[in-house]
Image (cartoon, grey):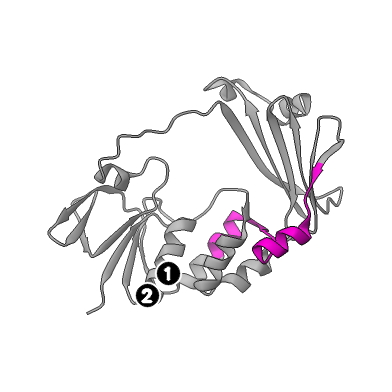
Amino acid sequence: MNPRAVIVGAGIGGLAGAISLRRAGFEVEIVERAPAVREIGAGLLIWSNALAALDLIGVGDAVHSIGWSGTSGRINDRSGRTIASTDTRTIRRALGELPVMVHRAELLRVLLEAAGDISIRVAATCSGVRTEGQKAIVSLQGGTELRADVVIGADGIHSSTRRALRDPSTPHYTGLTGWRAVTENHDRVSEAWLSVSGGNQFLVAPLTEGRLFVASAVHLEEGAAKFVSDAAAYQREIF
């Protein structure tokens, strides 16, 4: 009888873990508290170590097909003057390949397709995890319990599985607030660049299909972002 694994969370980490365990001979079930598996993020840069892991689980080619791998990148000051630039030849020599920028929703789609017939139980909220002998028990709201040889918690920043390990840590604000978006690449930007100004950062990176990923990190007091009524105008003023 194959060993059994339960994964809490059907995001990128949970699906990649499920595919890996199935390839290792496990019977796998995923529980996801959302009513459907979907990703609402923007861009994601995948570096060579993660690309190697995706190759190992058989989705490397699919990930490359949805991604943009740039030939250059630079860091600018507030005025646009380049203060540093990447040497892609050095990166290739050291790491084997360049990182790939993908849309998170498309990466999730690739992983869902690769997951195939792995059981995903949606609208299922994990209320706790405990051990009984050599088994782990995942308790769901409503009273259902799932027994497994292995449990993986991939359920985000407010993880219920982390609490099972008696981890007292809680999320804390780092002093930076981030905004992310995907927009049309009207100016045909062909390289990634990062602008830095007064400790704030603004990133631009091309995506496939004529799109552009933009992201910023701005020093703000905790909770102050809710008073920013026009995020685009606010960032234009800063950067």
- Asked whether disc 1 touches disc 2, contact meaning CB atoms under 8 Å apart, the reply is yes
Residue 123 vertical placement versus 64 (above, below): above
Circle 2: residue type? Ala
Circle 1: residue type? Ser
Magenta stretch contains residue 103 = yes
Q: Residues within 10 Å of mark 1 (few under 14, many from 20)?
A: some
| Picture quadrant where residue 97 is located | bottom right
Residue 180 vertical placement versus 143 (above, below): above
Q: Which mark is residue 24?
A: 2
Where is mark 1, residue-wise?
A: 20
Q: Quadrant of the C terminus?
A: top right
Residue lying at 67% horizontally and 69% vertically, measured from the top left: 65
Magenta stretch contains residue 166 = no
- Residue 182 in percent (x, y) is at 69, 47
Please, what secondary structure does the residue beneath circle 1 have? helix
Residue lying at 50% horizontally and 55% vertically, measured from the top left: 38
Report the Cα–Cα distance between label 1 and label 2.
6 Å
Q: As drawn, which residue projects farthest toward the left?
A: 133
| Picture quadrant where residue 62 is located | bottom right
Residue lying at 65% horizontally and 62% vertically, measured from the top left: 95
In this picture, which residue range is highlighted in magenta? 84-109
Report the front residue among 36 and 54.
Answer: 54
